Image: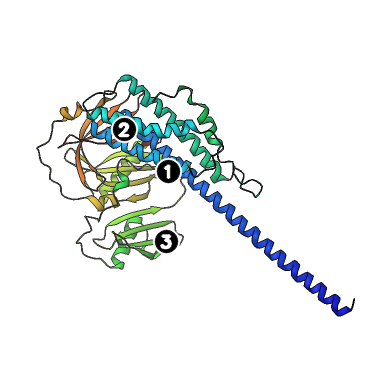
Amino acid sequence: MKRRTMIRVISFTAIAAAVLLVRNIKLMQENNRALRSVEAGYSRAIEELSLAADNISNTLRKELYAGTADMHAKLSQQLWRDSSTAKAALAQLPVGEMNLGNTYKFLSQVGNYALAMSEKVRQGETISDEEYKNLEALFSFSEKLKEDMWALEGALSSGEMPKLSSESAVPNVTEGFTDFEEGFDSYPTLVYDGPFSDHILEKTPIMTSGKERISREKALETAALALKVDPAVLTSSSKEEGKMPSFLFSDSEGSAACAVTEQGGYISYLLKSREVMTESLSDEEALRAGDAYLESLGIGNMRRTYYENINHVMTINYAYYLSDICCYTDLIKVSVAMDTGEIVGYDARGYLVNHQRRFFSDKRISVLDAQKKLSPKLKVLSRGLAVIPSDSQEELLCYEFKCETADGTHVLVYFNAYSGEEEQILILFESESGTLTM
């Protein structure tokens, strides 16, 4: 073979090998992208299923303590929606080879049974002891499903579960169903943020509406006073837009920040980021430090509602009180460092959004008439009047009943003070660190 021919053969061979190599690499990349896409889809489905299971468990628990037909109807509709969401998420997972009849049965019956109980109460009948036992059994199974699904979601998120490979097209995402399926022997035959804090920022702010706009320089002075620093150490990092436009200032290290509303010049929130390693204050001393800070800002008629101590920082929720009416909508949060009593967090956005002059008619149903509608499973500990937000962002004047269940759990139940409708149920989770609501 001539030298020139040999060179050509070698060249063509090298080119062909290079083309094949590039093609193989491209195919591997496409395969990896496909695998990652499938894996991401399974992860999303597991997360959706976990959230739905969480909601089912919380709503079933409220169903045990509902006392009126309207509340039973509201909760049963929520259960129907959440169980449908769970079944849709389950359908996205590679469980075709598994026998998940019990899981599907549970998700189907949980909504149907609640709807049946709702219809029974609507027709004037009462839920029997046996039916309450069935609801309690459903709640118990929902807790198990919730725990299993969140454990599975955690294993996927942390990478404890093997990744997909071309040899194994189905990931090991079904382990969490096995124990749940096998536990149906006794199946019946059928943040801390305090209450309502997730509703407070959905409206146009009332307190800043129509107020005069302040300059950036004036806002800087306000932020410096709030953070107790020299204005020279703060820089204007950005401007927040949205329904509450604010100037945002921070120090050079990013360890302190404060937002001041453009209209009215109110302190919207502040944050000091530092590690608190010890506790030198008692809970009561920290609570008094929070009270004193609100007084220094000239904000009156605020009372503590809920608090929690996490990592040596006490976060206190305050609500505005109009005479004896607790306005949960007008919320302020103050965070106190337990080592020195320094204020390391302040959030008045709920207060700025909702605070206003309010007038209430005296033509209300009696508190005793409202109390008669409570579930017989609840023992009343205290009662009073409260303003809470509705799903449509309107304010509702309600009778608030703090109750206790047979197992010692505390529950808040709200009845509309005018219509007598059961508006809301919150379950309190109390621990040494504070109180949370669901």
Q: Which sits in the foreground, 42 or 87?
A: 87
> What amino acid is found at the position of numbered circle 1 in the picture?
Asp
The answer to whether the residue labelled 2 contacts the one labelled 3, judged by CB atoms less than 8 Å apart, is no
Q: Which residue is mark 3?
A: 251
> What amino acid is found at the position of numbered circle 2 in the picture?
Leu
Which quadrant would residue 301 be assigned to in this image?
Answer: top left
Q: Which sits in the foreground, 361 or 36?
A: 36
Cα distance between the residues tagged 1 and 3: 22 Å
Residue at point 26% right, 60% down?
265
Left or right of 85, for residue 157: right
Q: Which residue is mark 1?
A: 339
Tell me the quarter of the image containing the N terminus.
bottom right
Crowding around mark 2 (Cα neighbors within 10 Å: few <14, some 14 to 19, many 20+) is: some
- Pair 1/2: label in front: 2
| Residue 102 at x, y percent in the picture | 47, 30
Residue 183 vertical position relative to residue 53 in the rendered view, above or below: above
| Residue 104 at x, y percent in the picture | 45, 34
Left or right of 323, for residue 225: right
Whichever of callouts 2 and 3 sits on the residue coming sooner in the sequence is: 2
Q: Which mark is residue 115?
A: 2
Which quadrant would residue 373 be assigned to in this image?
Answer: top left
